[in-house]
Amino acid sequence: MMKKIDITLHSGFCPTSEIRDFIGILCERLGLTTKSAYQIKTVIDEALTNVVRHAYRNKQGKIKMQVKHHGNTLTISIKDWGEPLARRPIKAPTDLVAKKKDHGLGLIMIDRLMDKVQRVRRSNYNELIMKKHLNESRL
């Protein structure tokens, strides 16, 4: 049976810590390990922060988040109607650290902590789709 939660936020008021805590409770109820729950909470925090900072450039804007649990997969989708996604290649973390850059590490973290990540520009919105397989959970 598929379970789904839809959340609508606004970048002018995006309570990332509350969303992260809510996702933590959801992960706990799904029986995820502490490690997996922490990874998912970290990714949510980073993704929402990126939308606020980069898509909306710290201005007002709508954010829609959907969390779906189906079988042994957790799918998280984050949509925004801000600036189109940058199409730069994601650099290796060592390149960013060596050049003392503090941007770009979040995208690498998202890619490494989730099992599948898609960044898509639809007709008028960006969508980040992240999947985590719950193999090590207690489901």
Image: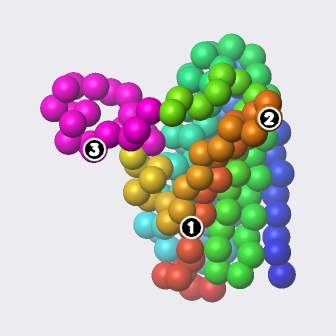
Give the Cα separation between the discs numbered 2 and 1. Answer: 26 Å
Q: Which dot marks residue 92? A: 3
Q: Secondary structure at mark 2?
A: loop
Under mark 3, the amino acid is Ala
Residue stretch in magenta: 88-107
Q: Callout 1 environment at 10 Å: few (<14), some (14 to 19), or many (20+)?
A: some
Please report the residue visible at 45 percent of the width from the left and 42 percent of the height from the top: 107
Residue at screen point 76% across, 22% down: 61
Give the alpha-carbon distance from disc 3 to disc 2, as whole Å.
30 Å
104 horizontally vs 19: left or right: left
Q: Position of residue 97 (x, y in %)?
A: 21, 34
Above or below: residue 33 compared with residue 127: below
Q: Position of residue 127 (x, y in %)?
A: 69, 43
Locate residue 121: give its quadrant.
top right
Classify residue 58 by image quadrant: top right
**Circle 3 sits in a helix, a strand or a loop, which is it?**
loop
Q: The residue under label 1 is which amino acid type?
A: Lys
Task: First in sequence, mark 3 or 2: give its number.
Answer: 3
Rendering colour mode: rainbow
